[in-house]
Image: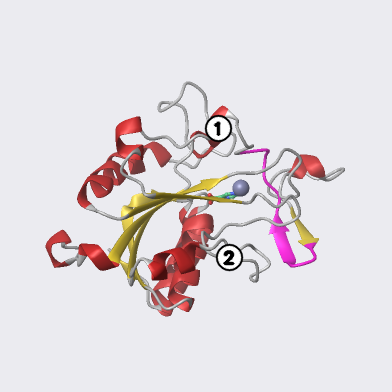
Amino acid sequence: MFNINTIDQAKTALIVIDLQYDFLPADTSKDDGALAVPGGNDAIAPIHDLIRMFDNIVLTQDWHPASHKSFASAHEGKAPFETIEMPYGEQVLWPDHCVQGSFGAKIALSDHLMAKAQMIIRKGTNPEIDSYSAFLENDKTTTTGLAGYLRDRGIEHVVMCGLATDFCVAFSALDAIALGFKVTLIEDACRGIDPAGVASQKDAMKAAGVILA
Ligand code: VGL
Ligand code: ZN
């Protein structure tokens, strides 16, 4: 289903989405991350294998200021996983996570693997707008610059993995398709927050033309 030997390395980039301590259960670090994705640690070995296989590597890093508007704690009387209406539409409220400079925001990779990445895209830095996708913030208008970076480097195919399948990975994959990239998602190297959300986002990705491998 996925054969590395058929990949044109010069035109392909591996994008590792939000592999950060706050998204990982205890084991990798000593406590559960603030928004630990069930089974997240099981995605790590497959992600390491992928990083070894590819030449072009981009990492994304959820990177919120304290009191970010996607945090339930920033809204009086709201609890995590409730939703609110934001100027750009519905927004799920999260526990505080991936606060800039915190341990939980760190990317859970060894220095050796981290060194292979040419680019780290930080997202969710605007206090007013969440950003699930590596390409577009949740207002669907503000770009992170990643599409331009990839195009300028001749990348046509993006291979995606990381956390969480139903949020940042799915939004990134769907935007990548809309932006004209070929997209392959490595399922074994992803984990999601909510099984129902994972199932519906997988359907949406398939329908959009994402190759699930
Ligand atoms: C994510 C919720 C909030 C993710 C990031 O990486 O999927 N989910 N921030
Ligand atoms: Zn976030």
Q: How many marks?
A: 2
| Residues at marks 2 and 1 touching, judged by CB atoms closer than 8 Å | no
Q: Residues within 10 Å of mark 2 (few under 14, many from 20)?
A: many
Element marked by disc 1: helix
Q: Give the residue at mark 2.
A: 136
Q: Who is closer to the viewer here, 122 or 194?
A: 122
Residue under the image location 71 percent in, 44 percent down: 80
Q: Give the residue at mark 1.
A: 104
Q: Is residue 196 visible?
A: no
Position of residue 174 in the picture relative to residue 54 (left or right) = right
Element marked by disc 2: loop
Of the residues under marks 2 and 1, which one precedes in the sequence?
1
Q: Residues within 10 Å of mark 1 (few under 14, many from 20)?
A: many
Q: Who is closer to the viewer here, 38 or 19?
A: 19
Residue under the image location 65 percent in, 71 percent down: 141
Q: Who is closer to the viewer here, 185 or 37?
A: 185
Q: Residue furthest right?
A: 76
Asked if residue 116 lies in the magenta stretch, the reply is no
| Numbered mark located on residue 165 in the image | none
Position of residue 101 in the picture relative to residue 19 (left or right) = right
Residue 9 quadrant = bottom left
Quarter of the image with the C terminus in it? bottom left
- Measured from the top left, where is residue 150 in percent x and y? 40, 65
> CA separation, marks 2 and 1?
23 Å
Asked if residue 89 lies in the magenta stretch, the reply is yes
Q: Residue furthest left?
A: 5
| Residues rendered magenta in the picture | 86-97
Q: Who is closer to the viewer here, 6 or 189?
A: 6
Specify the amino acid type for callout 1: Gly
